[in-house]
Image (cartoon, rainbow, N blue to C red):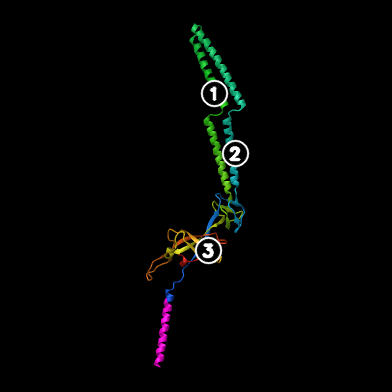
Amino acid sequence: MKKKNIIAIAIAALVIVVLVIFADRIIERKEPTYIQGTVECKTYKASSKIAGRIDSLLVEEGEHVVKGQLLYTISTPELNAKLIQAEAVRSAAEAMNKKADKGARKPQLEAAKSMWQKADAGLTLAQKTYDRAKALYDKGVVPRQKLDEAQANLDAMRATAEAARAQYDLAVDGATSEEKDATAAQVRQAQGAVDEVESYLSDAMVVSPVTGEISTVISEAGELVGTGYPVVTVLDMSDIWVVFNVKETLMPRITMGKRFSGFVPALDRDVEFVVTFISVEADFATWNATRTQGGFDVRTFAVKAKPVTAVEYMRPGMSVIVDWDSIE
């Protein structure tokens, strides 16, 4: 009986020792650390600098577009009217500039020449009259008053002739250099107004800034949209990456340029990634310390990684699972 009890006790002790060893190994065994990330890509929001009513919407969600492809147009009757006004002002300025460059027309030129010739003939006559009056005055035939009258008439005719010649020269040469500069500046100003309106009109035709896929179309044809309103969202599927929120306690394993493998459940395959960005500051706390527990708050850092090679069918929103312990 005693022998049986001893054997039972020994077996029980052995079982206890085995259980203790097994439990200790379970406790010591470290659970694998998995980090989940989300696929993202570069996003463009196509909008216009002008407000108005959508005239035509030419794309649908999920459609593939190329860079420069027309997405939608905005009706702009007010801008069309302003363009007509600006073009009319430009035409008037150009006409004035041409007139300043070419000078007077032929009838005006002939009239100015005739006036100058008449004034010049009057000056010649006044000069002869003065010469006769001077000769007679020197001989004492006429009084001083007659000589003064002839002198005054000569001076007046000389001034008239000079003015007529100046008018004729102006008609021949056209406007002065200052006037030509002024009219040329008016042309440039008018052209600037036309260019400004045309620039706004070009913004009424919104094109895709990149080759990609249409993610969302917020408005429909006929709706009013404001300035900068993102009517269409385009995803650049050629520029794709994964964002991980990594606890700071796991950061020692990751550095810029580090390569690692991640599993993409949606594709049922592993993909190799390379780290391209590590946030310069922490984002938020994933675990808060308490007085009873002690320790410290654990915060996270955003880490971005891009596929080493292009991955077919990878799309934004897909999950990527990484065994963090496998990163060396």
x and y percentages locating residue 216 in the rendered image: 57, 58
Residues in magenta?
A: 1-24
Residue tagged by mark 2? 88
Residue tagged by mark 3? 271
Of tags 1 and 3, which is closer to the observer? 3
Question: Which image quarter holds the C terminus?
Answer: bottom left
Of tags 3 and 2, which is closer to the observer? 3
SS state under label 2: helix
* First reached walking from the N terminus: tag 1 or tag 3: 1
Secondary structure of the magenta portion, mostly? Answer: helix
Look at 41% across and 77% down and name the residue there. Answer: 24
Query: Of residues 15 and 221, which is closer to you in this image?
Result: 15
Question: Which image quarter holds the N terminus?
Answer: bottom left
Residue tagged by mark 1? 166
Q: What separation in Å lies between label 3 and label 2 (alpha carbons)? A: 63 Å
Q: Is residue 5 magenta?
A: yes
Q: Amino acid at mark 1?
A: Ala
SS state under label 3: strand
Query: Is residue 294 shown left or right of residue 48?
Result: left
x and y percentages locating residue 82 in the rendered image: 58, 43
Whether the residues at callouts 2 and 1 have beta carbons within 8 Å, the answer is: no
x and y percentages locating residue 27 in the rendered image: 42, 75
Residue 269 occupies quadrant: bottom right
Query: Is residue 281 shown left or right of residue 172?
Result: left
